Amino acid sequence: MIGISKLYCGTVEPSDALRYGRHSGKMPSHLLQFSEDKKPVVVWNMTRRCNLKCVHCYAQAKDQAFDNELTTAEGKALIDDLARFGSPVMLFSGGEPLMRADLPEMAEYAVGKGMRAVISTNGTLITKEMAHTLKAIGLSYVGISLDGMKEIHDRFRAVKGCFEDALQGIRNTQEAGIKVGLRFTINKFNVGDIPAVFDLLEEMDIPRVCFYHLVYAGRGSRLVEDDLTHEETRQAVDLIIDRTKDLHDRGKPKEVLTVDNHADGPYLYMRMQQEDPERAAEVLELLKMNEGNNSGRGIGCVSWDGEVHADQFWRHHSFGNVRKRPFSEIWTDMSDPLLSKLKNKKEYVTGRCAGCQWLNVCGGNFRVRAEAVSGDVWAPDPACYLTDEEISETI
């Protein structure tokens, strides 16, 4: 994650992270990306079932029951292990996590174990009653996916009316007093709706938005040709930066992040070098703390069936199953060559990445995207939009 508002608008300083010793167990949630120990935030895709049919779904979810999902007891055993291991956040996802009746019970259990519990949802099932239930159990945050305004969102999610249902889910969450944010996956079809998303943030007083770059996994693997060009990506990132700054300058600040393309970090820094060199130096320090992509280190994933992955896009490679061994043992067992190399992937990347001056800032970007296009896990990420001149210049 690249915190545009944190970095560009100066809402976070290097000293803010240093104050907590950069220990994930002590840092507030908005600073976790700057932790030094990188205890993994774990995404638990607790179900593969979903009431929508999103064209970019990495889980290839369907509206049907699956008989291989972890039981409630197995889920609680997973949470016990993660809490002992020191994982700071449990992110309940799917499919659609609210398709599981035991989601509130699981989230409450995680909170009781001292973890922050958050959910990633399409928002359509958050009734007033469910929102108040989630508030009562201590849920920290609800991320609701909107991939454009009504026409584009409904087409992208392949269910008519789901945009209005998601907006009602946002209202219900806000009314219950839970922090809510938007999740927007950028592609050729919806990039034109980014300004409207910023308008919606302001209109509905939504405090947070994450703009996700497209990752070629699951059903999203068919959308490679629908990704932005490098120049279009630069334009989209500039627009996000500009609109974030506009809200900040007008006294209506929002937390804005870009996700899944860590070229955004160097790009933001180079822009700031031209605009505010003094702040740029602080931004570079924070970007180095962030360390770029952390798949297999600072983020991990457990599938509905208990398989452990480097992140939610790596379903084709499992490091083990929590039904057989605890997550903490799997995550620290370096006998798996891929897991071992992902812990320090900067030593293994090739091509442009190997000689890039920003390697310590972006961490080699997304290996799963490189593999999807080239078949080589260690090849350059094709979504890196920095030019050869930008990656070879001396700081």
Image: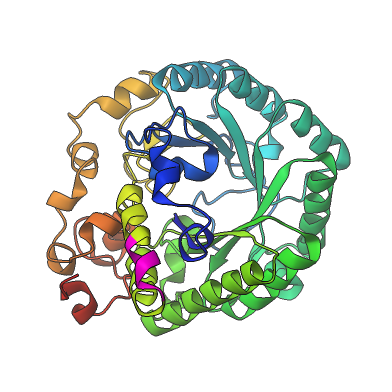
Q: Is residue 375 above or below residue 337?
A: below
Q: Which residues are magenta?
A: 276-281
Please state the horizontal and vertical placement of residue 374, each as a whole percent of the image. Answer: 24, 66
Q: Is 328 positioned to the left or the right of 101 in the image?
A: left
Q: Is residue 124 above or below residue 320?
A: below
Please state the horizontal and vertical placement of residue 266, each as a whole percent of the image. Answer: 32, 67
Quarter of the image containing the N terminus? bottom left
Residue ID at (49%, 63%): 4
Residue ID at (39%, 49%): 14
Residue ID at (31%, 25%): 330
Residue furthest front as drawn: 278
Choose top left, top right, bottom left or bottom right for residue 53.
bottom right
Does the magenta-highlighted stretch encompass residue 305? Answer: no
Q: Is 271 positioned to the left or the right of 43 in the image?
A: left
Quarter of the image containing the C terminus? bottom left
Residues 383 and 259: in front is 259
Choose top left, top right, bottom left or bottom right for residue 384.
bottom left
Residue ID at (79%, 58%): 167
Please state the horizontal and vertical placement of residue 355, each as a whole percent of the image. Answer: 12, 65
Q: Is residue 166 above or below residue 315?
A: below
Q: Is residue 377 visible?
A: yes
Choose top left, top right, bottom left or bottom right for residue 75.
top right
Residues 62 and 342: in front is 342
Q: Is 101 positioned to the left or the right of 71 in the image?
A: right
Residues 157 and 107: in front is 107
